[in-house]
Amino acid sequence: MFDYSNILTNLRKNGYFRERVAVDSPQDRYVLIENKKVLNFTSNDYLGLANSEYLKEVFYKKIKKFGVGSGSSPLISGYSSQHKELEDELTQLTKLDSTVVVNSGYLANVGLINALSDKDVVIFQDKMNHNSIIEGTRLTKSQLIRFKHKDYSDLDQKIKKIKKYLKIIYVDAVFSMTGEFSDLKKISAIAGENDALLVVDDAHGFGVIQDNSDSFPSSLSMYNNNDINIDAYIGTFGKAVGVFGSFISGKNDIIELVIQKSKPYIYSTALPASLAGTVLESLRHIKKNKSLNKKLTENIKFFKQIAKKESIKVQESESPIQTIVIGDPRYLKKIQESALKAGIYIQAIRYPTVPKNNDLIRISLTSSHSTKDIERLLYFLKTI
Ligand SMILES: Cc1ncc(COP(=O)(O)O)c(C=O)c1O
């Protein structure tokens, strides 16, 4: 008989057993863990909106008007005027043809791949793509071909070998466990030359990456419109937007295909209308309050500058995700525990989330952190 307990024993023995930490406070600059207030560097709440007074007020009002539950799936009666308004706003922000709001970023990827897949479809993916894209493909009849991380000549060679199938290139815009950016201009050129569709998951860039223009912050803002041609784009509401849920924007046919064919979309209760309405107000709030992104950018700069001065070996990243590779998962766990004792909460990321022996400390910077908070973190990191 299959021995499940053996799997758990091995996870414990090799330092890969995961334990959940019960946070007893809102997500914020500080969180409460076992009655201890600790400085939080683990949250993807990049703009500090998850506990914002303004959005909490909006949410109360929306709940009064629309209730707490959606009652059914979007194709029954779970789709509301709030979802529709949110989708229209997202279509404007992304400058793509249309949008569908879905329940989470994980389900956006699984659901989009489910709708696009067929035995004659080949999906090319960066090796470091998010798990939802890799597993989402493995659940289908489509063929999965992975190229070396950020190695676009490897992608080019692999895609040129495939002749007759429908080709899709599917990438993270910002890698969740390293904070690096994909080069969407190069990838888009390869997609164009090889007659492939391009899908971009911008979970960690949507609401975050801001150029000097007036456009909504996203990884797309780093490029000229003429330089990239995207067929579908995914953003999440649970990270910089501070709420919950996700969306897919893209070419009309692709979005319509999701609504008609995507099983996770069709067969799951819709996001509550009150939540969709709150997300809409959060997007407007981000657009109006450029100071949030400005502060986040300053914090990233400050962190990198001091880390360099103090010779702390942080990996190259221009995003709020900053990492230090430790390698040994047991030692990494010990570092996390001693950080907690020092009142600092950092995340230990271990295999299989990252490749073996690449176990790392993941630091999430937000606009809520002060320079003093960052100095305190770096002072601790210097001791390891
Ligand atoms: C690149 C990427 N895509 C999708 C997701 C999933 O998004 P969600 O948390 O909304 O399910 C994540 C979550 O961390 C992610 O990093």
Image (tube, rainbow, N blue to C red):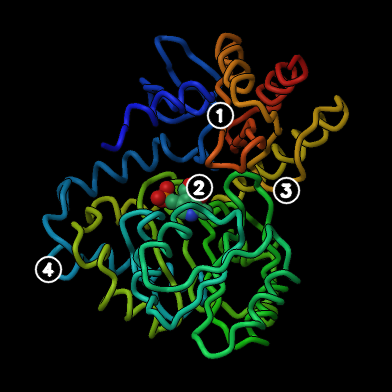
Instruction: Pick whichever of labels 1 and 3 is earlier in the sequence.
Output: 3
Q: Amino acid at mark 3?
A: Glu
State the residue in front, 177 or 233: 177
Q: Quadrant of residue 280?
A: bottom left
* Residue at figure coordinates x 19%, y 63% from the top left: 267
Q: CA distance from mark 4 to mark 3?
A: 43 Å
Q: Residues within 10 Å of mark 1 (few under 14, many from 20)?
A: many
Is tag 2's residue or tag 4's residue first in the polypeptide sequence? 4
Identify residue type, mark 4: Ile
**Residue 347's mark?**
1
Task: State the residue position of label 3.
Answer: 318
Residue at x 60% of width, y 44% of height: 177
Q: Is 62 rendered above or below residue 15?
A: below
Tell me the quarter of the picture where residue 185 sits. bottom right
Q: Nearer the viewer, mark 2 or mark 3?
A: 3
Between disc 1 and disc 4, the foreground one is 1
Q: Nearer the viewer, residue 7 or 335?
A: 7
Label 3 near label 2: C-beta < 8 Å? Answer: no
Q: Does residue 286 appear anywhere in the picture?
A: no
Residue 54's spot in the image, x, y percent? 39, 41
Give the labeled residue for mark 2.
240
Give the Cα distance between marks 2 and 3. Answer: 16 Å
Label 3 CB-ligand 1 distance < 8 A: no
